[in-house]
Image (cartoon, grey):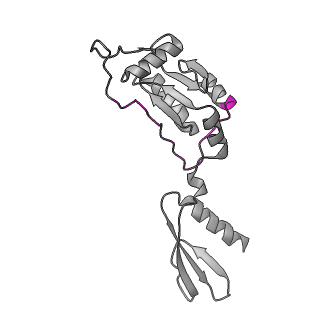
């Protein structure tokens, strides 16, 4: 009996997208069976059930919510090649919710980055009040660990960056010229 329950749980878990169809029936020996395929032969009490995703699975974990509330993450990045791509990939792989700011596209982001670091170089990671210049995977992981973020994303979870300015058109400076392109750490 436990095997069938485990099989049912596995079927539910494997169906991460959308609702799964599961059939329940009683065989000739009065044993309840579950399967993702319609039963054949002499069976009774066949029921077709739809099993949808668990609501809890679609929500961020408590640890993630707690860390994000105490130490929000901001990534200053642009299209700077492999370094910026690696920086975004690290945060995405760990399932970290972050705000993406593009100093090349936004004067306010450029001013904020320059005030914080003294330069317009990306990528820069801000975890709570701590600022980390340049992508260094070990240092960034240590900072995220210290802030209490989980080391990996929950299965099926996808966290898109909460971009505040990455896709905005460039804001003109007071003299009408666009903001200067920030330098890149290599």
5 displayed left or right of 93: right
Q: Residue at x 54, y 81 (%)?
A: 47
The relative height of residue 122 versus residue 101 in the rendered view (above or below) is above
115 displayed left or right of 63: left
Depth check: give the residue in front, 12 or 117. Answer: 117
Depth check: give the residue in front, 35 or 152. Answer: 152
Location of the N terminus by quadrant is bottom right
Per the picture, the main secondary structure of the magenta-coloured stretch is loop
The relative height of residue 58 versus residue 178 in the rendered view (above or below) is below
**Residue 159 lies in the magenta stretch:** yes
Which image quarter: residue 94?
Answer: top right
Residue 185 in view, yes or no: no
Residue 157 in view, yes or no: yes
Residue 146 % position (x, y): 69, 29
Q: Residue at x 61, y 56 (%)?
A: 56
Q: Which residue range is magenta in the image?
A: 145-168
Q: Residue at x 53, y 64 (%)?
A: 52
Q: Residue at x 58, y 20 (%)?
A: 131
Which image quarter: residue 5?
Answer: bottom right
183 displayed left or right of 135: left
Which image quarter: residue 127?
Answer: top right
């Amino acid at each position: 009996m436990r095997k069938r329950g485990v099989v049912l749980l596995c079927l539910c878990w494997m169906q991460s997208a959308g609702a799964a169809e599961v059939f329940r029936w009683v065989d000739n020996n009065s044993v309840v069976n579950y399967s993702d395929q319609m039963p054949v032969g002499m069976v009774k009490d066949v029921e077709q059930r739809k099993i949808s995703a668990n609501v809890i699975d679609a929500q961020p974990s408590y640890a993630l919510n707690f860390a994000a509330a105490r130490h929000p993450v901001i990534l200053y990045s642009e299209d700077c090649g492999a370094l910026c791509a690696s920086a975004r990939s690290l945060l995405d792989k760990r399932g970290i919710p972050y705000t993406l700011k593009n100093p090349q596209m936004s004067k306010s982001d450029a001013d904020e980055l320059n005030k914080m670091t003294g330069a317009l170089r990306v990528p820069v990671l801000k975890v709570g009040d701590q600022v980390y210049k340049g992508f260094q995977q070990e240092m960034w992981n240590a900072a995220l660990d210290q802030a209490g973020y989980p080391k990996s994303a929950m299965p099926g979870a996808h966290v898109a960056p909460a971009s505040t300015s990455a896709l905005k058109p460039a804001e003109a400076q007071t003299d009408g010229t666009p903001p200067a392109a920030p330098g890149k750490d290599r």
